[in-house]
Image (cartoon, rainbow, N blue to C red):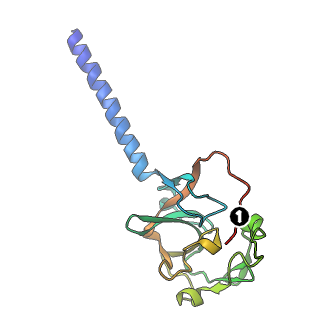
Amino acid sequence: MTKKKNKNEAWAWAKIIGLTIIFTIGVRYFILSPVIVDGASMMPTFEDGEKLLINKIGPRLTNYNRFDIIVFEEKKDLNYIKRIIGLPGDQIAYKDDVLYINGEKYEEPYLKKYKGTLQDKGDFTYDFTLEEQLGEMTVPQGHFFVLGDNRRRSIDSRDPNVGFIAQDAILGTASSTLWPFVKRENIRFDH
């Protein structure tokens, strides 16, 4: 009787461990995934070396929104993190450090604090239009126009090598910071 009981207990533990492993793998690959920010293109929002969780499932069930921060696959084994600025059908332009979407001025509160930190006192985001940058009047259907928050040091949709981001290339949205717990406030933009 004890031998059978021990066998049943061992089997029950094996099932629990197996289900835990399957659940953990499922969450890691299909729901939440850790990423490490590499570079300064999303400063001040995210710093180089910051560890984030990306939500892989939520946005796939709904739509992406303007100003969502996404992680997308640029090339095999090369992922970028950027902010969605333009949705399908949008006209995007920057003039005198102001964002215009479909001719309407948009505030970018996430940049406000840092626009005045440039040593040369120039524009944080240089003037451009979609047509000048990518030869298109509007963002194509099924695609997005993305920018890094550190506009002067970001490789993003303004670069024809990156261009518009296909929805299928999006891996998920940045959902929370794992590390560091406290953000530094003494950020200055030298370039």
Asked whether 189 or 107 is in front, the reply is 189
165 displayed left or right of 23: right
In this rendering, position of residue 183 left or right of residue 50: right
The residue labelled by disc 1 is: 110
In the picture as drawn, the residue positioned furthest to the top comes out as 1
Q: Residues within 10 Å of mark 1 (few under 14, many from 20)?
A: few
Q: Amino acid at mark 1?
A: Tyr
Q: Is residue 115 left or right of residue 29?
A: right
Nearer to the camera, 173 or 52: 52
User: Image point 56% across, 67% down: which residue?
Assistant: 82
Image spot of residue 179 (x, y percent): 58, 47
Name the spot of residue 67 as percent of width and height, x first. 63, 67
Quarter of the image for the N terminus: give it: top left
| Location of residue 10 (image quadrant) | top left
Q: Position of residue 21 (x, y in %)?
A: 35, 38
Q: State which quadrant residue 115 falls in.
A: bottom right
Task: Kindly identify the residue that appears in the image at 32 percent across and 25 percent down.
Answer: 13
Q: Which residue is painted at 71% across and 60% down in the image?
A: 187
**Residue 126 location in percent, x, y?**
68, 81
Quarter of the image where one finds residue 129: bottom right
Image quadrant where one finds the C terminus = bottom right
- Viewer-nearest residue: 119 or 132: 119
Element at label 1: helix
Camera-nearest residue between 93 and 44: 44
Image position of 163 with respect to 63: above or below = below
Picture mark count: 1
State the residue at coordinates (48%, 75%).
Answer: 142
